[in-house]
Amino acid sequence: MVTVATLLLLRHGRTTANADGGLAGRQPVELDETGRAQATAVGERLRGLPLAAVVTSPLIRCRQTLDLALPEAEPVVEEGLIECGYGSWEGQPLKKLAKEPLWPVVQQHPSAAVFPAGESMAAMSARAVAAVRSWDARISAEHGPEAVWLACSHGDVIKAIVADALGVHLDLFQRIVADPASVTAIRYTPLRPFLVRLNDTGGDLAGLVPPPRKRRRRATRAVDSDAAVGGGAGAAR
């Protein structure tokens, strides 16, 4: 039985930069019409979930996504969830950037990638993982182990958090996909994280709410961290 908090990672909806094939980075790009529709749709899926907290990247595209998806929420800005600092790459067409010498490094060896006048991908990963793990521990302590909370962020940031949860090297994170307005769910147990959902763009999210805990005669933290051998019965529906 799950007795740890559940983190929902929500990527912002599609932006004008996404549609134009550009790299937005930390520029104040906004959602386009498709992105606004995506944000509204994911709000329907999130409706009814008892969110203990909502945190967000400070960038406007994340704020707009939450305004449409969760209009009653009061998001807390978390700087650790901001987009990677792409430096002089920001605002450039991806087709142009694909010709840069750094491009193969970003694709094949991102842990070594440092963007000109910007941030390294390793630094981005470290501060994003630290942010969500800190928030998860705080929310678990304040709201109990059945708490569900949401963090709205960006594609590369979410992919880096997922790579950490899976225990894979950052150099493999380009194999992970986080589409606009997708939901990814992670549970951090005392021994290991569990990736519960990945890049979910249409499924029912109600099953992510843990059932009430039953009393155990001898509760052990290790049991909550153990994987279900054979795959388990899945979430109650």
Image (cartoon, helix red, strand yellow):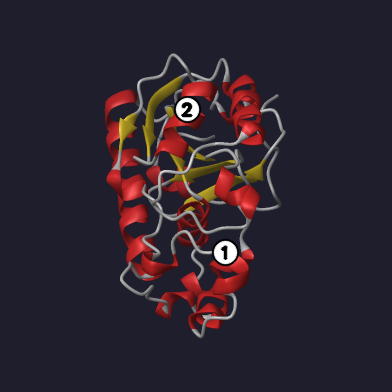
Query: Farthest residue in the bottom direction?
Result: 101
In the picture, which quadrant includes the N terminus?
top right
Check disc 2: other Cα within 10 Å, few if <14, some if 14-19, many if 20+.
many
Reading the chain from its start, which is encountered first: label 1 or label 2? 2
Look at the image and tell me whether residue 151 can be seen. Answer: no
Determine the image quadrant of residue 47. top right
Residue wearing tag 1: 93
Going by the numbered disc 2, the residue's amino acid type is: Leu
Q: Residue, x 61% and y 41% (percent of image)?
A: 182
Q: Are marks 1 and 2 in contact (CB under 8 Å)?
A: no
Secondary structure type for disc 1: loop
The residues bearing labels 1 and 2 have C-alpha atoms spaced at a distance of 27 Å
Q: Position of residue 42 (x, y in %)?
A: 62, 28
Residue wearing tag 2: 66
Q: Is residue 81 above or below residue 118?
A: above
In the picture, which quadrant includes the C terminus?
top right
Determine the image quadrant of residue 31. top right
Q: Residue, x 53% and y 20% (percent of image)?
A: 49
Q: Residue, x 52% and y 60% (percent of image)?
A: 166
* Front position among marks 1 and 2: 1
Going by the numbered disc 1, the residue's amino acid type is: Pro
Secondary structure type for disc 2: helix
Q: Position of residue 224 (x, y in %)?
A: 47, 42
Work out whether residue 59 or residue 172 is closer to the camera in this orientation and state it. Answer: 59
Work out whether residue 106 or residue 220 is closer to the camera in this orientation and state it. Answer: 106
Q: Is residue 40 above or below residue 234?
A: above
